[in-house]
Amino acid sequence: MTIFVARLVTGLLCAMLMLGQTASTEGPVVGVGPFLHIVSDLDRSLAFYHDALGLEISGPPGEHKFTDNPAVANLYGVPGKQFRAAVLKIPGSPMGIELVQWGEARKPKGEPIAGPGVATLFLRRSDGPKSLRDPDGFPVELERSENSGADLTVSVGDVGKATELYGRLLGLKWDGMRFEKVKAGDAPGAPFPEAGQGMLRVFVRGIDALTASLKNAGWSVITTGGAPVTLPQGQRVIIFRDPNNFYVQLMETR
């Protein structure tokens, strides 16, 4: 339990590094945190992201054990379930990757994931270009570049509407997140949190007012009870699914 809490705190601290680079004077968003990825088998996913891609694991060394954390389970809308997680650094980018496994490990389907709401992780590296799929079918693109870094592209039915939606409701201004048009009606139907799904953590101010605004705009609440929960470290957090089937985790700054 001590090791897990240390890892979780490390992940939150790494995410906070982005605040200064993504802060906006407009809207409730003040920064963007890591990309969170639901996986079917944490060890298998670490073998891909750490062993194969060479991404460094954050936090203290040791086994990634399961833990009971009612607040986090309610946050993800799966009360009573156990989980384990690992955070990895991306060279040249303040955006890391947080891998989260809920429940017992399962054999990954490995099928390609596509449709509205599916995110693609772009890693700028010297060994690109290359198109990859992680064990859960999540797309990873290696772009050849001498300047390391990362970007996130989210598939949507209408790029203009998605851009306007995030700009109007969140005031999100981050060059590292882009939208890409795909056919409407192909959104994956698996309930959250299923392996292969992705989510972006966004730091906000006024989380209660923002929660009400997003509900009124048709965003679906994933978090149990439909309201922000308080994590052991004191942060108030809630998870939404946007109209394009992409998941966003709002974390209130203090």
Image (cartoon, grey):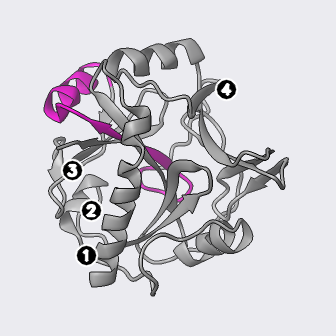
Residue found 45% across the figure and 87% down from its top: 62
Question: Residue at label 4?
Answer: 182
Q: How far apart are marks 3 and 1 (CA)?
A: 16 Å
Give yes or no for residue 192 being in the magenta stretch: yes
Crowding at mark 3 (Cα within 10 Å: few <14, some 14-19, many 20+): some
Q: What element carries label 3?
A: loop
Residue 121 appears in the rendering = no
Front position in the image: 24 or 151 = 24
Front position in the image: 203 or 196 = 203
Residue found 53% across the figure and 64% down from its top: 88
Give amino acid for label 3: Thr
Q: Does label 2 or label 1 sit earlier along the sequence?
A: 1
Residue 221: assigned label = none
Closer to viewer: mark 3 or mark 1: 1
Crowding at mark 1 (Cα within 10 Å: few <14, some 14-19, many 20+): some
Q: Distance between the residues labelled 2 and 4?
A: 32 Å
Q: In which quarter of the image is residue 80?
A: bottom left
Q: Do the residues labelled 3 and 2 touch (CB within 8 Å)?
A: yes
Q: Are marks 2 and 1 in contact (CB under 8 Å)?
A: yes
Residue 172 appears in the rendering = yes
Q: Does label 3 or label 2 sit earlier along the sequence?
A: 2
Give amino acid for label 2: Ala
Q: Does label 2 or label 4 sit earlier along the sequence?
A: 2
Residue 224: assigned label = 3
Q: Do the residues labelled 4 and 1 touch (CB within 8 Å)?
A: no
Q: Does label 4 or label 1 sit earlier along the sequence?
A: 1
Residue found 63% across the figure and 65% down from its top: 55
Question: Residue at label 2?
Answer: 73
Residue 68: assigned label = 1
